[in-house]
Amino acid sequence: MSTIVRLGKKLKKYIMPKAKPCISYVRRIERVKTDERVVAMTFDDGPMNAPCNPSSFGEIDYGDAPLTSVILDTLDKYGAKGTFDVIGYTGDNYPDECGPVGSPSWGGVKYDHYPDYKKDSLAGAENQGELLRRMIDGGHQVTNHGYKHIIFGKKPFVYGKRECLKNIDEVTDDLRRLDDILRKRYGYEITMSRPPHYVDRISGGFTSYDAYALLGYQYMAASFDGAGWLPAAGESGEGAFAAEIAEMISPFEKNISENPDFFCGQIIFQKDGYNMAKRTPVAFGLEKQLDLLTSAGYKVVTVNELLGYSQFADVGRDDPDYDIFESLIAEHAIAYSDNTLCPERHMSVGELAMLVAPREWAVEKRIEAISKKGSRLSNCFGAMEWCRKEGLLGAKIKEDAPLTSEIISAFSSYFEKIPRGFTRREVLKSYKK
Ligand SMILES: [Zn+2]
């Protein structure tokens, strides 16, 4: 093989996305499959107890009302429920210096500081209990965006100068610290998380999915950018602010007019904080977005409520077996990491192992093995080990082998009756709960 071909193959391995993600205890929820006009909005990096900037625009003047209150008031006005992806406190992230306004390091070169450099106590669950209480009492959802909002691992190209958490223990400690605040002070149980800046890789062969598996979280992503967090290009002053608000509104106008069902089941990304230019277009653009959505008949719900319309990205409530899938997903790993179910695929041995193995055992075994090895292992490693230990699988059977009647016969006690076909649908339908 020529060097170029080999190099090309190597590059392809890095550039091309994998054919199909693995079955996972943690599902990355971007949107769900539904025909109903329901949509969720997420707000990152708050709560923020600093005023909007600018505080007035056009006919609206918010005075010194904190941004988070303005967002909550606006949601209330439309009977909308938001999902607030909150932080704990960034005040321990010093020494640091801040970069130029308008750049990604506007709030800090080594770390992020919310709502702003040297104003850390004005944002986060640690110090902004009143705002957090208002979110919870108002029926909004709160999710875990990391106590210190430090990226989970290195991301050289974009965040080369950023300090990151050192290992999976630091990541889970950081997440647990914020989880504890919500649990102990508010009796609130967090179920989802989004990594700071969506950085997934954790040193030592781990990813954010592993940290979330240990915490029992799902991965909250988004399918649509609500915009406003990037400074408007080529404008300054009031013109820039007006442009940022327009960038938040026009994609909503365009998409709804082209296809009123466009937003069905989508999760919209927004910011409960300053954008890179230290402005808060969300305070003024959100109202129009909500007006457009509700006028088109949309109900704006929390991400958790959205999952009530369908748990999956590719299978909706109209599927004849939806209830079976939904009851299984509560306890078992049956979906892929991208939250698809792919019911017509032939089930593999590793997928069967994930279905039957006890979750906690399998997760711990795998984490332990990665720690020893220092590099990544497949998602079903722990589940495969469990099945081998129980004598259900021989040592030589590979996880990506397709299921056969010979293999499944060893698992007969897990099934009402042995499935006739081995599509994922057939196997899941026959599973004894
Ligand atoms: Zn963030």
Image (cartoon, rainbow, N blue to C red):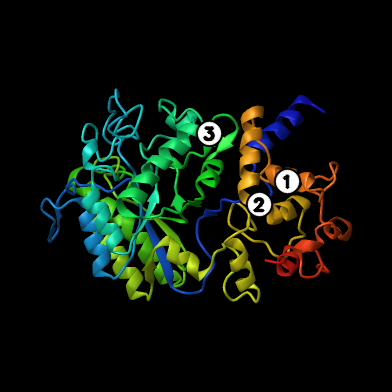
User: Which numbered circle lies on residue 50?
Assistant: none
Q: Is residue 266 visible?
A: yes
Q: Residue at x 32, y 56 (%)?
A: 248
Q: Quadrant of the C terminus?
A: bottom right
State the CA–CA distance, disc 3 to disc 2.
25 Å
**Ligand 1 rendered quadrant:** top left
Q: Mark 3 Cα within 10 Å, few/some/many (few <14, many 20+)?
A: many
Q: Residue at x 43, y 31 (%)?
A: 159
In x, y percent, where is residue 374?
Answer: 63, 28
* Labels 2 and 1 touching (C-beta < 8 A): yes
Which residue position holds label 3?
Answer: 202
In x, y percent, where is residue 316?
Answer: 57, 70
Which residue position holds label 2?
Answer: 358
Q: Is mark 2 within 8 Å of ligand 1?
A: no
Q: Is residue 232 above or below residue 40?
A: above
Q: Is residue 107 above or below residue 307?
A: above
